[in-house]
Amino acid sequence: MGKQKSVVMAVLCVMVAVGVTACGGEVNKPAAKTPPSASPSPQPPVDPFAGLSADQIADKALDTTKAADSLRVKGSDASDEEPMAFDLALAKQGDCDGNITSEGATAALRKVSQTMYMKGDEKFWQQMGKGEATSAEEAAAVAELLKGRWVKISAEEAKKEGLAAICDADALLEPADSTKTGLTKGADTTLDGKKAAVLTKKDGAETLTFYVAKEGEPYLLKFTSQGGKEPKSAEFSDFNAPITVAAPPAEQIIDPSKMGG
């Protein structure tokens, strides 16, 4: 019996993977679990404008924005008698594509090299005709003639009529560039999912506000002038996006310089 008992005990000790029964008088204890290491505390984001004044931030934003190969600008300007809204894609070399809207009338614009093309809706050409002191009948006739057509405008004519600045990124940035001093930092905000520094300045009843990207390149994302006599707003996006602008088909173009009369 003693030998059989010893054999049974030996078999049991082989079969038991962990010590739950005595095979030598001592119970095997499970290995102690290592406590999970504590996660490192998240570090606060680095402020890209640390140490810079509000004026320095604005200056940096404008320099960065002007250096972009292309951009899109969408906004409004009430500095003239007829407030205008615009949505334009601009290339640094001067090409542009987009539209302008005034008093419910819209015109598409394209600028290729030094030549501009404009295609207005019926209301746009009627308003333009009234601006030239023509009769309502004459304005309607002009609108019918130009319906669905692009008017070709030379560089000289565009400059004369004040149209050249519409496709000039530096000209559209000028309201911000000329007011970029005397600014104060405000609380950061978010524009279209992008964190932005907010810089403001009061000039009488007018409040000027700059929104500068705090992530990626420090582009000027938005500029507004509110409360004054000439309110305006411009939002900038699509920096360095490819822009290809082609002249309209020849059969859709009217060249006033070749019409005579």
Image: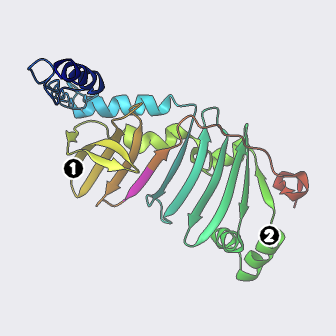
- The furthest residue to the left: 25
Q: Is residue 36 above or below residue 86?
A: above
Q: Indicate whether residue 209 is drawn in magenta.
A: no
Residue identifier under label 1: 202
Q: Is residue 249 left or right of residue 153?
A: right
Q: Amino acid at mark 2?
A: Lys
Q: Main secondary structure of the magenta part?
A: strand
Question: Residue 104 in the image: x percent, y percent?
Answer: 57, 73
Q: Secondary structure at mark 1?
A: strand
- What secondary structure is found at the residue carrying circle 2? loop
Residue 127 falls in image quadrant: bottom right
Extent of the magenta region: 230-234
> Where residue 127 is drawn, which disc sits there?
none
Above/below status of 198 relative to 133: above
The structure residue drawn at horizontal position 81% and vertical position 62%, both measured from the top left corner, is 149
Residue 247 position, x and y percent, is 80, 46
For label 2, the residue is 147
